[in-house]
Image (tube, grey):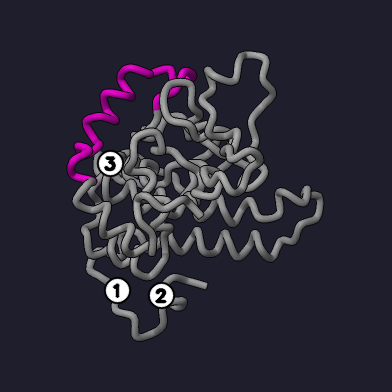
Amino acid sequence: MSCERKLGKKAKLPDGWITVAPTLEALDRELKDQIAAGHDGKRVVEMQWPVHQINWQKTRYIYDMYYIYKKIDKAVYDYCIKNKIVDANLIAKWKKPGYERLCSTYVINPNNYNFGGVSICRVPKHDLGPDHPAVEDKFCGCRGCASGRGGKRNIFGNKYGQYLAAIQVSREERAAKGEEVVADNVWASTEDEAKFDTANVDSDDDDEGGNRRKRRRKLQRPADEFQDKDQDDEKAAGTSAEAPAK
């Protein structure tokens, strides 16, 4: 179901909605297709992965379009928060140091894990050791969302881990320069994915490590600009900064 239909015919869309509408519609269709596809050939723990991963991608898209690339205004951002198009709890966590790439609030809730711990996907790569097997959270399929060097750009290892705002902005900039842009859908091909600046990631496997981090710092707003918005987001999410993640 599209965002517009889900919110009702009388819902008034904010100016600038057209900027994000095509991507949100594509993600809604993808979610519907994944649910209809069934669970043949999947492990039990994998059945809900697409739901959680698409929720992360939709939320990250709106977050990046507003905070990183400034392509939408506060009216569009607030509209998405108010109507629960995106996960306000997750956004509130992304603004806090150490949680910039968090996959889900579920994985940091000690009540969900033995001995009051958190998911293994929250353990930094350098703390796991070189011989540690591949990380894969059972709840959402995250392969590692800890902040800092050594993290994965694509935390799910599939198209749902791509940064769609970076892809959209890059395509728009190339089109503005008169370059030919072939875009069959909102996702990038596996070959092209590494070309897009994800803006938020430090990674050991990043060939442009230093330059990419410089671009990231230039794009990101200072931390104090987030603080004024934390209270509104957490209020919309029905939670406080001190409450344990659900």
Secondary structure beneath dot 1 equals loop
Rendered image: mark on residue 172: none
Q: Which mark lies nearer to you, 3 or 2? A: 2
Q: Is residue 205 magenta?
A: yes
Furthest toward the top, the residue is: 130
Secondary structure beneath dot 2 equals helix
The residues tagged by marks 2 and 1 sit, at their Cα atoms, a distance apart of 8 Å
In front of the other: 118 or 220: 118
Furthest toward the right, the residue is: 41
Secondary structure mostly seen in magenta is: helix
Left or right: residue 178 compared with residue 200: left
Assess whether mark 3 and mark 1 are in contact (beta carbons under 8 angstroms): no
- Categorize mark 1 by other alpha carbons within 10 Å: few (<14), some (14-19), many (20+): few
Q: Where is residue 190 in the image (x, y as percent from the top left)?
A: 55, 35
Q: Indicate the amino acid at tag 2.
A: Glu
In front of the other: 87 or 212: 87
Secondary structure beneath dot 3 equals helix
Quarter location, residue 22: bottom left
Residue denoted by label 1: 13
Furthest toward the front, the residue is: 115
Residue denoted by label 3: 173
Q: Is residue 199 magenta?
A: no
Q: Which residue is painted at 31% across and 62% down in the image?
A: 235
Q: Where is residue 69 in the image (x, y as percent from the top left)?
A: 26, 44
Residue denoted by label 2: 4
Assess whether mark 1 and mark 2 are in contact (beta carbons under 8 angstroms): yes
Span shown in magenta:
202-226
Q: Which residue is painted at 34% across and 40% down in the image?
A: 96
